[in-house]
Image (tube, rainbow, N blue to C red):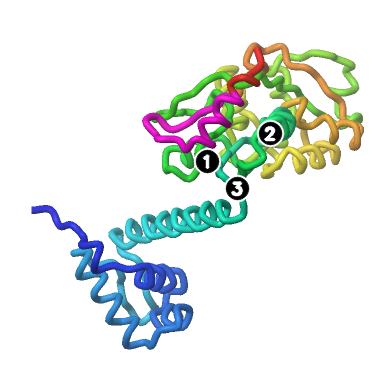
Amino acid sequence: MAHSINPARVDFVTLRLFCAVAQSGSITKGAQACHLALSAASRRLSDFEAAAGSKLLERSAQGIALTPAGHVAMQHAMRLFQGFEQFSNELNDYSSGVRGHVRLWANMSALTEFLPATLATFLGQHPDIRVEVEEQLSGDIVRALVDGLADVGVFAENTPAYGLDVAPFQTDELVVLCAKQHPLARSRAKQVGFKACLAHEFVGLNRSSSLLELTSRAAEQAGIPMRLRVQVRSFDAMCHMIAANLGIGVVPLAACKAQVAALDLKVVRLSDAWATRRLLMATKTGAVLSPAAQLLAAHLLRQAGP
């Protein structure tokens, strides 16, 4: 028979202690962080393992380490804490006059280009709703929606989106940026195929980026390796690296207009069909959205572009 945990045998103090011990690698430090006596902490951990029916912690002279089952327990404990924090925040919102709370995760392109005006309109119409916005990479947004950490997400269409209901939101134009002294800028070309760009070194986003995945796939199809000289986490950092002539980069034009002007960068349009990409709006399939989240999702769809 499968073992199941009796919720009455596990409380938040024990879960917080377990996480503190796992993070510090020490029962003593975990007990101190939770203001518990060492003997009480040890007893709680033993009771937790008994309730779980599995060994969760490996004890050795080097300290405490998580077992495979312990890693699973840690992951779910952190989700419980995040859920409780959201529960607390939303109740606080109601006490201060806010009548709805939505967690919106969006990639950099959407957040820079389209969402500021759209959210301003929405919040003007619904002043009693609070929208918590997080800028994340497209792959992380999908995972957050599936895991219930976000209510609504906006991300690039080339991101696998299993388990989500998706709809078109806006269209994004990708261009090549280079420094004015770069050979591509000196060629005076106003448009170029991505294959020709592969003769040069690139500045790119990190490996979780849907944009890097898109350009890497295009390079693979062209049969030419993409030479990444520098990788960064933001378009702003990309633009500064490009301005220093460390390489060229593929970016959403509208998301980088300010940096293009400030850093005097050259914009070269791409002739490839994939350079016009769609941004998608998504919610988790089968999720019961709050009224506030339903209102925001409907508003985003009404604001969707061609």
Q: For the image shown, how many numbered marks are present on the structure?
A: 3
* Alpha carbons under labels 1 and 2: distance apart: 21 Å
Mark 2 surroundings: few (<14), some (14-19) or many (≥20) residues within 10 A: some
Specify which label sits upstream in the sequence, 3 or 1. Answer: 3
What's the amino acid at mark 3? Val
Q: Secondary structure at mark 1?
A: helix
Q: Is residue 80 left or right of residue 196?
A: left
Q: Is residue 7 magenta?
A: no
What's the amino acid at mark 1? Asp
Q: Which residues are magenta?
A: 280-300
Instruction: Please tell me which residue lies in front, 280 or 260.
Output: 280
Q: Where is residue 241 shown, x and y percent of the image?
A: 79, 41
Q: Is residue 295 magenta?
A: yes
* Alpha carbons under labels 3 and 1: distance apart: 28 Å
- Label 1 vs label 2, nearer the camera: 2
Specify which label sits upstream in the sequence, 1 or 2. Answer: 2
Q: Residue at the location (74% across, 30% down)?
A: 117
Tell me whether circle 3 and circle 2 mark residues in contact (CB < 8 Å): no
Tell me whether circle 1 and circle 2 mark residues in contact (CB < 8 Å): no
Q: Where is residue 144 shown, x and y percent of the image?
A: 48, 42
What's the amino acid at mark 2? Leu
Q: Choose top left, top right, bottom left or bottom right for residue 240.
A: top right
Answer whether residue 61 is visible to the viewer in this image: yes
The residue indicated by pointer 1 is 140
- Label 3 vs label 2, nearer the camera: 3
The residue indicated by pointer 3 is 98
The label on residue 119 is 2
Q: Residue at the location (29% across, 77% down)?
A: 44
- Label 3 vs label 1, nearer the camera: 3
Q: Where is residue 110 shown, x and y percent of the image?
A: 67, 31
Tell me whether circle 3 and circle 1 mark residues in contact (CB < 8 Å): no
Q: Secondary structure at mark 2?
A: helix
